[in-house]
Image (cartoon, rainbow, N blue to C red):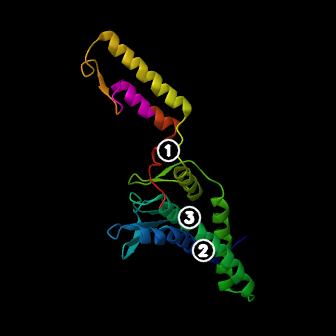
Amino acid sequence: MLDVLTVFPLVLLIVITLFITVSLHELGHAIPALLVTERYLDVTIYVGSIGDANKSFHFTIGRLTVYCKYNPLLWYRGCCVFSDYNLSIDQKLLCTAGGPLVSILCTIGGWYLLMAVQQEGFLRIIVGGIFTVSLLIAVAFLIPDPRPRYTPSGFTVYTDSYQIFRLLRMSSPKVTHPSFAIWVSHTRNKACALQNKNKKPAHRAGFHPDHSGNPISINSQLVASVAFTSIAPLEVSSTFRRS
C-alpha cells in the first residue's frame, strides 16, 4: 500500500507539472493578444477554471492579469480571455494558435531535455511530467470539439482546434446557399403580388421598400435574416477581411 511519503511527492509532481504546462499554454494565447490588441484593453489568464475568478489568487503585470484557483487539483484546465472585436481573422488565428504551438514546443523541448538529462532526479521528473502533459494537450488539439463552454461573465469559449476551424471557415469566400436565394426571391414576388392585389400603399400594407426599391414584408425580411443565420451562421461573420 502506498504511504503518505510516496503519495505526496507524486501529487506534488502532478500539481507542479499541470501549473507550468497550463500556464505556458495560456501564455501562448496571451502574448500574441497583448501584441495585437489595443493598448487600453486587458488580457486575462485563468488557471484552474474557465473564466471564474472566485476563490483564486491573482496578480497583474501591465495589461496581463492572471487568476489561479487556490485548489491545485483544478489546475488541469484554463482559458485566456481578451477582446477580439477589432482584430482581423489572421490576428485571431495567431492568438488562437499560439497556445497549441507553445504546447507542441514544450513537447519537443521536453523530449530533448529528457535525452540531455541522464541523471535521475527531481529535475528529470519535472521535465518528464511537462513532456507528458504537453504531449497530451497537443494530441487533444487534433480533436475539434464543437461544444461551447461559457464563462461566468458570458464569454463563449471553444477548444483551440474548433476555434481555428471556425476562423478558417470565416476567412474563406462567402457562399450563400442556393435555396436561400430562391426562397428570398419567391417571398419577394409574393409580397409584390399581394400588395398589387390589395392596392394599398406599401407602408400601410405592412411593407417597406428594400434596397432595390421592391417592397418586401417586414415579417418576411425578419424570417429571411433568421433563415440566413441558420443556413450559414459562420458566413454572417465573414465580413471581416484578412489583413
Q: Nearer the viewer, residue 201 or 12?
A: 201
If the image is split into quadrants, where does the N terminus sit?
bottom right
Magenta span of residues: 212-226
Q: Where 81 sits versus 102, above or below?
A: above
Q: Is residue 7 rendered to the left or right of residue 53?
A: right
The earlier-in-sequence mark between 2 and 3 is 2
Callout 1 amino acid = Glu
CA–CA distance in space, label 1 to label 2: 40 Å
- Residue positioned 36% across, 14% down in the render: 194
Question: Mark 1 = which residue?
Answer: 235
The earlier-in-sequence mark between 1 and 2 is 2
Callout 2 amino acid = Thr
- Residue positioned 43% across, 72% down in the render: 35
> Residue 17: which disc?
2
Q: Nearer the viewer, residue 107 or 90?
A: 90
Q: Nearer the viewer, residue 33 or 129?
A: 33
Quadrant housing residue 105: bottom right
* Residue 6 seen in the figure: no
> Is label 1 or label 2 in front?
1
Element type where label 2 sits in the image: helix
CA–CA distance in space, label 2 to label 3: 22 Å
